[in-house]
Amino acid sequence: MYWKLTAENLLERCLDAYTRDNNENINSLIWTFAPKHSHCGKETVEIATFLAVSIFNEGFSAILRIMSEMEIFVGQQTNIFAELRDKEPMLQKQQD
C-alpha cells in the first residue's frame, strides 16, 4: 500500500501542486464563503456557490462587477487585488 503512495509519477504531480481536480477547487471556493463548521442556510450556500462559480469561471473581476451592480464602491486597492489574483494562474503556467 505505502509503495503505491510513493510512486514517482504521483509524487511528481505533488511537486507542482497538481493534486486537485476542478471539482475539489470549486468545492474549496464554496466552503471559503460558507464554512462547513458553521451552520449555513440554503440561501447562503446558493450565494456561496454563485460566487465560487463566478470566480472559477471569470476570476475575481466577476466579483467586482457584482459589487458594482450592488452599488458597492470598489476602490483602487480592491481593483489591484482582483487583478493580481486573476493573474496568478497565468503566472504559474508561465513558470512551468
Image (spheres, rainbow, N blue to C red):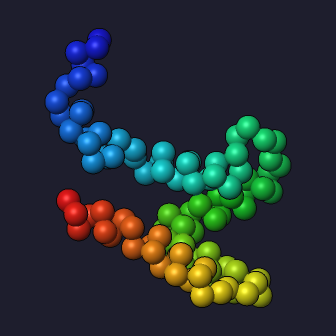
Q: Residue 55 vs residue 16: left or right?
A: right
Picture coordinates of residue 12, whole percent (x, y): 21, 39
User: In the figure, residue 8 lies in which quadrant?
Assistant: top left
Q: Can residue 69 be seen by looking at this rendering?
A: no
Picture coordinates of residue 28, whole percent (x, y): 55, 48
Q: Residue 56 vs residue 69: left or right?
A: left
Q: Tell me what residue is drawn at x 22 percent, y 15 percent.
A: 3
Q: Quarter of the image for the N terminus: give it.
A: top left
Looking at the image, how many numbered discs can be counted on the residues? 0
Above or below residue 62? Residue 8 is: above
Q: Tell me what residue is drawn at x 24 percent, y 19 percent.
A: 4
Picture coordinates of residue 9, whole percent (x, y): 18, 34
Q: Can residue 5 be seen by looking at this rendering?
A: yes
Q: Quarter of the image for the C terminus: give it.
A: bottom left
Considering every residue shown, the one lying at the far left of the view is: 8
Q: Residue 46 vs residue 19: left or right?
A: right
Q: Tell me what residue is drawn at x 64 percent, y 48 percent.
A: 31
- Comparing 72 with 27, the one in front is 72
Above or below residue 17? Residue 85 is: below
User: In the figure, residue 75 lies in which quadrant?
Assistant: bottom right
Considering every residue shown, the one lying at the far top of the view is: 1
User: In the figure, residue 39 lies in which quadrant?
Assistant: top right
Picture coordinates of residue 13, whole percent (x, y): 25, 41
- Comparing 17 with 55, the one in front is 17
